[in-house]
Image: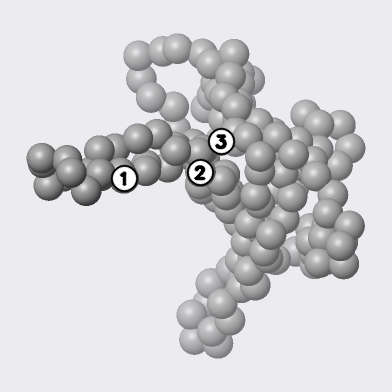
Amino acid sequence: MAVLRDDPYGGFCFTVGLGDRDPTAVSAGFTEVSGLERRLTVLRYRAGNDPGLAPRLLPGLAAPVEVRLSRGVIGDLALHQWLEAGLGGAVERRDVVIALLSEDRATVAQRWRLRRAWPVAMLGPTLDALAGTVAVETLVLAAEALETD
């Protein structure tokens, strides 16, 4: 699905579908998405009789996926309720789709899918009477897998 071109895409046109209705529908307007990373943990191993002093590096398990979605506070409590259900013992896992769009918003340049994601934290805004900024909240999602297409 990724669309190859010579110039890199801007990181300012994207959609997020939270899988609560149609898995590809846009669910909420977010200002920032971060943490789209996959990695292996590195295991360090050294036998006591190894002649060298440096450990061997071995591949370990895949590190957990943790993605942060930030948006301005708009009074919508659906994300808070999703987390609240998990805090009550009823974790609801969803497939979340994040799509990077071309500047004309007509083409999906690349898509990331968070498989079986669920909220693990909701960070409230920083409130400062002298700052004059937008109140931003952040939803933290954990996922079993991150796929790219």
Type of amino acid under label 1:
Arg
Depth check: give the residue in front, 120 or 96.
120
Which quadrant of the rendered structure holds the N terminus?
top right
Image side of residue 106 versus residue 85, left or right: left
From the image, tell me which residue sits under label 1.
44
Contact between labelled residues 3 and 2, with CB atoms less than 8 Å apart: no
Distance, label 1 to label 3, CA atoms, is 40 Å
Percent of width and height locating residue 6? 35, 14
Which residue is identified by label 2? 63
Local secondary structure at mark 1: strand
Q: Does 73 sit above or below residue 41?
A: below
**Residue 76 appears in the picture as rendered:** no
Nearer the camera: disc 1 or disc 3: 1
Question: Relative to residue 149, is residue 114 depicted above or below?
Answer: below
In this rendering, position of residue 120 left or right of residue 33: right
**Residue 108 x/y as whole percent:** 61, 21
**Front-most of residues 9 and 61:** 61
Camera-side residue of 38 and 73: 38
Which residue position is annotated with label 3?
A: 13
Mark 3 residue type = Cys
Seen as rendered, the residue at the extreme front is 49
Cα gap from disc 2 to disc 3, whole angstroms: 28 Å
The kind of secondary structure element at disc 3 is: loop
Q: Amino acid at mark 2?
A: Ala
